[in-house]
């Protein structure tokens, strides 16, 4: 597909990208600030890991229901609910972190925990709706990689805006101020949603609701794809959790820690800007296996970085590797999934990776509290390096419309999907 067509896709995706930035920035900032709040309050790394894990609880419990809701109702109703959940969740965290309020310590922790659950629910519901809608803009596999590269800028930019903004606000006025400002960001997603055309009611919804979600695991390559996605997602979680822990061990400020996470996200954004222009040359399996080997190497080096600039250098290289993964994962997922069940398939992927995100940080906290953040990087580096072989076996699906998707005709389907 030409660069002109890629730019046209980017313009069509603009409202979806804007909406996801608003939702995801609030969650990303809160996800960085919540465990740091626990450490500043003198709580154990295990409690910090628990707060991080709670952001993934709602996506595990409600992901499949969210996917089916998106398949039934399209974009707008799920996004309205996502805005409500995200705003309420981060506002609860602000109440818990408000130092002048007469809350007992346990209630503060409960408010932070409840806020994490709601913020995670809102971000995940919005993500499923946005990804499903975006995938319907693409008429072929090359366009799918372009679509999800452009869309992948949203979480990348959000992971700059959220953590950096949270770090600056924490240093300037405390955790309550940071959470309070972050709680306003999701409201702007409603403004972007008004610019996304409504989708025609889908066909065959009743038949879909009677089918078991897990039969999607029988699609060729789906289980291997989910394994690779889990390894990459866990690598991302290790970085998100271990960088604040490593920075705390090094005595870095909140703004310095936020800056390290910010340059990582900027690196992710940079590689996703490049991918649309190279999409026709890229093969999913090759990109995934290469990214996993680079990730393993960076994780081996990260514990030897003792300053913010050194940590930032590691973060930049890691961002390039991990940033290239998501467009390849989502391109493959949409090609092997029936058209009418794409929301459900995205939800299944979300449930799998969020189940890991809910459990793994507890282990991260336990291990980090005993042997330090360095051991987390080394252990995960060995695991993701071993998993590169599975990524190489993901063959590129045959060219043409993704499985279950009719070939576009006259642009009518694209117009409805937008």
Image (tube, rainbow, N blue to C red):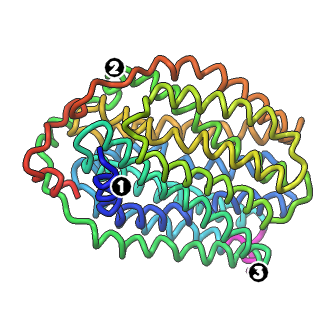
Secondary structure state at the residue bearing disc 1: helix
Residue 96 colored in magenta in the image: yes
Residue drawn at x 71%, y 48% as measured from the top left:
315
Residue drawn at x 85%, y 40% as measured from the top left:
303
Q: Which mark is residue 212?
A: none
Mark toward the viewer: 3 or 2? 2
Q: Which residues are magenta?
A: 95-104
135 on left or right of 36? left
Q: Which mark is residue 130?
A: 1
Q: Which mark is residue 220?
A: 2
Return the disc, 1 or 3, that comes first in the chain's sequence.
1
Measured as percent of width and height from the top left, residue 415 is found at: 16, 57
Mark toward the viewer: 1 or 3? 1
Measured as percent of width and height from the top left, residue 191 is found at: 36, 76
Reply above or below: 414 against 175.
above
Crowding near pointer 3: few (<14 within 10 Å), some, many (20+)?
few
Secondary structure state at the residue bearing disc 2: loop
Query: In this view of the protein, which residue sits in the foreground, 189 or 347?
Result: 189
The secondary structure making up most of the magenta span is: loop
Residue beneath disc 3? 173
Query: In this view of the protein, which residue sits in the foreground, 184 or 262?
Result: 262
Return the disc, 3 or 2, that comes first in the chain's sequence.
3
Residue 299 colored in magenta in the image: no
Q: Residue furthest left?
A: 410
407 on left or right of 67? left
The Cα atoms of the two marked residues, 1 and 3, are separated by 34 Å
Measured as percent of width and height from the top left, residue 267 is found at: 62, 52
The Cα atoms of the two marked residues, 1 and 2, are separated by 25 Å
Measured as percent of width and height from the top left, residue 312 is found at: 76, 53
Image quadrant holding the N terminus, namely: top left
Crowding near pointer 2: few (<14 within 10 Å), some, many (20+)?
few
């Amino acid at each position: 597909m030409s660069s002109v067509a890629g730019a046209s896709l980017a313009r069509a995706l603009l409202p979806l990208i804007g909406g996801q930035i608003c939702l995801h920035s609030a969650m990303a900032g809160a996800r960085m600030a919540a465990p740091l709040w626990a450490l500043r309050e003198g709580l154990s790394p295990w409690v910090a890991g628990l707060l991080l894990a709670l952001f993934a609880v709602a996506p595990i419990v409600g992901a499949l229901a969210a996917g089916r809701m998106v398949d039934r109702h399209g974009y707008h109703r799920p996004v309205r609910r996502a805005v409500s959940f995200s705003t309420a969740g981060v506002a609860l965290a602000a109440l818990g972190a408000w130092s002048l309020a007469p809350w007992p310590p346990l209630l503060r922790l409960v408010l932070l925990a409840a806020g994490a659950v709601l913020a995670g629910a809102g971000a995940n519901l919005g993500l499923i709706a946005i990804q499903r809608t975006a995938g319907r803009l693409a008429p072929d596999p090359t366009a799918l990689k372009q679509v999800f590269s452009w869309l992948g800028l949203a979480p990348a930019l959000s992971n700059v805006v959220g953590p950096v903004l949270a770090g600056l606000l924490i240093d300037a006025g405390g955790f309550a101020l940071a959470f309070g400002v972050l709680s306003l960001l999701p409201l702007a997603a409603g403004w972007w949603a008004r610019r996304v055309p409504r989708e025609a009611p889908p066909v065959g919804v009743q038949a879909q609701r009677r089918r078991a979600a897990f039969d999607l695991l029988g699609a060729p390559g789906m289980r291997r794809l989910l394994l690779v996605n889990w390894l990459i997602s866990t690598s991302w979680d290790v970085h998100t959790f271990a960088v604040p822990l490593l920075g705390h061990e090094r005595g870095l400020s909140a703004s310095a820690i936020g800056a390290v996470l910010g340059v990582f996200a900027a690196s992710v954004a940079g590689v996703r800007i490049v991918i649309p222009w190279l999409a026709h040359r890229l093969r999913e399996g090759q990109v995934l296996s290469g990214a996993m080997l680079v990730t393993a190497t960076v994780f081996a080096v990260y514990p030897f970085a003792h300053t913010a600039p050194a940590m930032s250098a590691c973060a930049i290289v890691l961002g390039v590797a991990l940033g290239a993964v998501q467009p390849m994962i989502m391109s493959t997922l949409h090609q092997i999934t029936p058209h009418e069940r794409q929301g459900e398939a995205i939800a299944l992927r979300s449930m799998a990776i969020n189940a890991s995100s809910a459990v793994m940080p507890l282990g991260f906290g336990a291990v980090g509290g005993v042997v330090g953040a360095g051991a987390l990087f080394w252990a995960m580096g060995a695991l993701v390096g071993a998993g590169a072989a599975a990524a190489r076996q993901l063959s590129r699906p045959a060219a043409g419309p993704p499985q279950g998707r009719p070939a576009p005709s006259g642009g009518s389907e694209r117009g409805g999907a937008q």
